Amino acid sequence: MQIARFFQQNKSVTQEQCDAEEARRLTNQSVTATPSQGGTSYTVEGRHVVV
């Protein structure tokens, strides 16, 4: 719910773009959303790297 609301309010980028294009590029691995999210940010992790 919180993640969906974040992307509804920030339509310049999609969750898929963040995951595939940016986070995966930065970590060089598959990423998933973290259980705890910030109110104005989207946080993902790939193994031991948090973006």
Image (cartoon, rainbow, N blue to C red):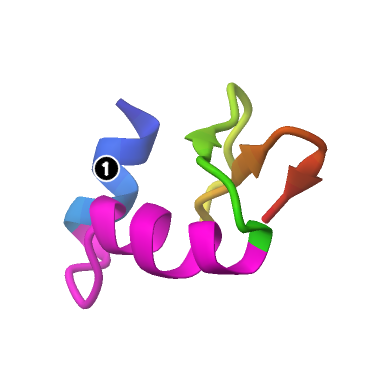
- Image-quadrant location for residue 12: bottom left
Q: Residue at x 28, y 63 (%)?
A: 17
Relative to 49, is 11 on the left or the right? Answer: left
Relative to 5, is 44 on the left or the right? Answer: right
Of residue 4 and residue 32, the one placed in the foreground of this image is: 32
Q: Residue at x 50, y 33 (%)?
A: 32
Q: Amino acid at mark 1?
A: Arg
Q: Is residue 49 above or below residue 18?
A: above
Of residue 42 and residue 46, the one placed in the foreground of this image is: 46
Residue 6 rendering spot, x and y as whole percentages? 33, 50
Relative to 32, is 8 on the left or the right? Answer: left
Image quarter in which the N terminus is found: top left
Residue 47 rendering spot, x and y as whole percentages? 73, 33
| Residue 19 within the magenta-colored segment of the rendering | yes
Q: Is residue 42 above or below residue 18?
A: above
Q: Residue at x 54, y 48 (%)?
A: 39
Residue at the disc numbered 1: 5
Q: Residue at x 58, y 37 (%)?
A: 37
Of residue 48 and residue 44, the one placed in the foreground of this image is: 48
* Residues drawn in magenta: 9-26
Mark 1: secondary structure: helix
